[in-house]
Image (tube, grey):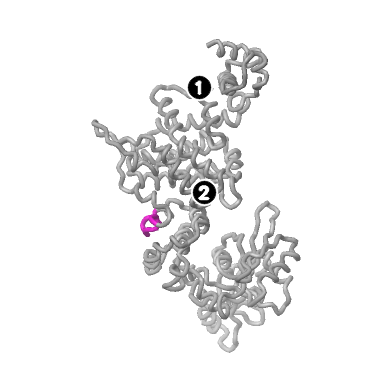
Amino acid sequence: MTDGIPSPYTGRWVARVRGKIIAQGLTPDEALRAAQQSRHKEKPEIIFMLSLPPLIQKIINILPAEQEIYLVGGAVRDLLLSRPSYDLDFAIPANGISLARKVANALDADFLPLDEERDTGRVIVSNEDGSRTFLDFAVYRGADLIEDLRGRDFTINALAFNPREQKMIDPTEGGKDIRAKIIRACSPTSFSDDPVRILRAVRLAAALEFHIDKSTREWMKESASQLGRISPERLRDEVFKMLGGARANACMRALEMLGVFPYLMPELSAMKGVEQSAPHVYDVWTHTLAALDYLDQVISGLRMGYDADKTNDMFTGLLGLRLGRYREQLANHFAKRLNTDRTHRSLLFFAMLYHDVCKPETKTVEEDGRTRFFDHDNKGAEVAAERLRSFNMSADEIQRVEMLIKHHMRIHFFASRLEHDKQTPSRKAIYRFFRDCGEAGVDLILLALADTRAVRAQDLTIDTWTAYLDIARILLENYWEKPEEIISPPRLLDGNVLMKELGITPGPVIGQLLESIRENQAAGKIETREQALAFAREEIQK
C-alpha cells in the first residue's frame, strides 16, 4: 500500500480482519455491510486503500512516530484518480517551517520558508529525470484538521489521508464528487473568500474532464467582479496554467460564459460576434476558440510517440506524413522555456488567444461588401504586450508574444502564393523570415497551421492544406537542416574590414552593407570574401 505499487483495492474502502481483506466498497458503510454478510460475528477494521509514492514513505520514516501529519488537498485527489502529482501538501498541527527544514536536510533537498505568517515551509526535491517535486508543510488553517478541510476551495480538494493509519478523512464528501466527476465548492462563500478560485475551478474542470456543479457556477458568476482585488501574479499563474494544460479552448469558452473577461482580460470581450468575410466561416471570437483547439491538435499530432494510425482526421494524418520527421526537434523546441514558471506551450497559446484581438477596432467594410482588418496584427501585438506587462511577465516573454502576433500573417502569404501562383519562398525570403522571427519562426509555423484550419474549418480543402504543409516543410527543413547555408550564413566580413577596404567612415551604411551581403549569401549569390567585397564596392558606387 505504501510502496508505490498499485493495489486492486486502491481508491476503495476495505474491511480487514486479522490483516486479511474480506470485503470492499466505495464508502465505509458499503465495506462494512459487505463484510457483515460473510463475517457477521466478527468486527472488521475499515480502512481506505491508497497506493502512495515511495517519497511519502521516506518522509514518514524521517519524522518521529508521534508526529501527526496528513497528506491533503489535490495530492490526495490525484492519487485517487491515478494521476501523477508533483505537488504534495501536508497538514500538521504546528511547526510547519521547522518540520520542512528537517525533511529537506534528511532528503538533501532544497528548503524555502514559503509563508512565515502561516508557518508554511517548502521542500523542493530534484528527481532523476530533471523534474522537481514540491513538498509543502503547513499548519492547520483553523482549530483542527476538519476545520482546515472545510475551509478549502472544492470538495474534491477537501480530503486528507493519514499515511500511518491508512485512514481517509472526507468531511465534505469529496470522494463521492470525484466518483461523480463533479466540482463543487465547499461553501457558498468559497469564491468571495478567494475569487481566484473561479479560475481554478475552470482549470480543474478542463484538466480532469469534470463538470462544475450548478450552484457552484452561480456563485462563480456572482463573485466574478471581485477578481479585480486579486494580485496580477495570481491571475497570471491561473491563466497560463489553463493555456498550458488540457482543453485551453474550453477554459476560455467557460470564462467568457461566466462573465469573467471584463475583470481579467477585458479586450477579449469585443471579439464576440464580429463577423468576417470568406474564407472565414466563424466570427472572430468563435474563430479564436477554434484556433486554440486546432493548435492543440497540431502540437499533439507532431509530438513524440504519436500514433498517426489512430487518427480519423485526414488533415492530422497528412500533418504527420509531411512534418513527422521533425518530432524530435519540435520536442526539444518546446522543452526550452523563457521563464521557469511557465511553459513554452502556454506562451504560444496566449499568442493564439490574442492574435486577432484588434480585429474589432480595425474592421472596415469595402464597397463590394468585403470585410477587412488592416493592421490588426501590429496593433494586436501592442495590446497583447500591454496585457502581459499588466501580468508582470518577463521582457523575453513579452517580446516573443509580440513577435508571434505581429508576424502571424506571413505564413499565410507564403501559402497563398504557393497555392495560387505555384511560387515557393525564395532563399532570400526564407532568410528574412527567420532573421526577423528567430526561434519564434517555428512557433509561427504551428500557429499558422492551426489558424488556417480555424479560418476554413469544414471548408478547408486538401489543396489548401497541402500548400500550408509544403510551406511548413520548406521552412523547417531550412531551419533545422540547412542553418549555415540559408538561415545564418557565416560572416565573411566585419565592419572594420569594410571601412578599410572601401575607404568609408563609420555609419548606418556599414550595417546595411553587411546585411545585404548576408542576404545574398543566403540566396547563394555570394560564397567568398572576395565576392562579398566586390558586391560591397558595387553597392557603394550605386
Q: Residues within 10 Å of mark 1 (few under 14, many from 20)?
A: few
Q: What element carries label 1?
A: loop
Q: Name the residue under label 1.
A: 426
Task: Say whether residue 362 is visible.
Answer: yes
Please report the residue visible at 45 percent of the width from the left and 31 percent of the height from the top: 410
Q: Camera-side residue: 491 or 217?
A: 491
- Magenta region, mostly helix, strand or loop? helix
Q: Mark 2 points at which residue?
A: 346
Toward the bottom, the furthest residue is: 41
* Left or right position of 157 against 17: left
| The magenta stretch spans residue 258 | yes
Q: Is mark 2 on a helix, strand or loop?
A: helix
Residue 131: x, y in percent?
Answer: 65, 54
* Left or right position of 458 against 434: left
Residue 146: x, y in percent?
Answer: 54, 78
Q: How far apart are marks 1 and 2 (CA)?
A: 32 Å
Toward the front, the furthest residue is: 505
Task: Say whether residue 24 is visible.
Answer: no
Q: Which amino acid does label 1 sit on?
A: Ser
Q: Decide: marks 1, 2 in contact (CB < 8 A)?
A: no
Closer to the chain start, of discs 1 and 2, is 2
| The magenta stretch spans residue 203 | no
Q: Determine which of the numbered discs, if any, sits on residue 218 in the image.
A: none
Q: What residue type is labelled 2?
A: Ser
Residue 152: x, y in percent?
Answer: 51, 71
Question: How many labels, in total?
Answer: 2
| Residue range highlighted in magenta | 253-262
Q: Camera-side residue: 296 or 536?
A: 536
Q: Say which quadrant the N terminus sits in.
A: bottom right
Q: Residues within 10 Å of mark 2 (few under 14, many from 20)?
A: some
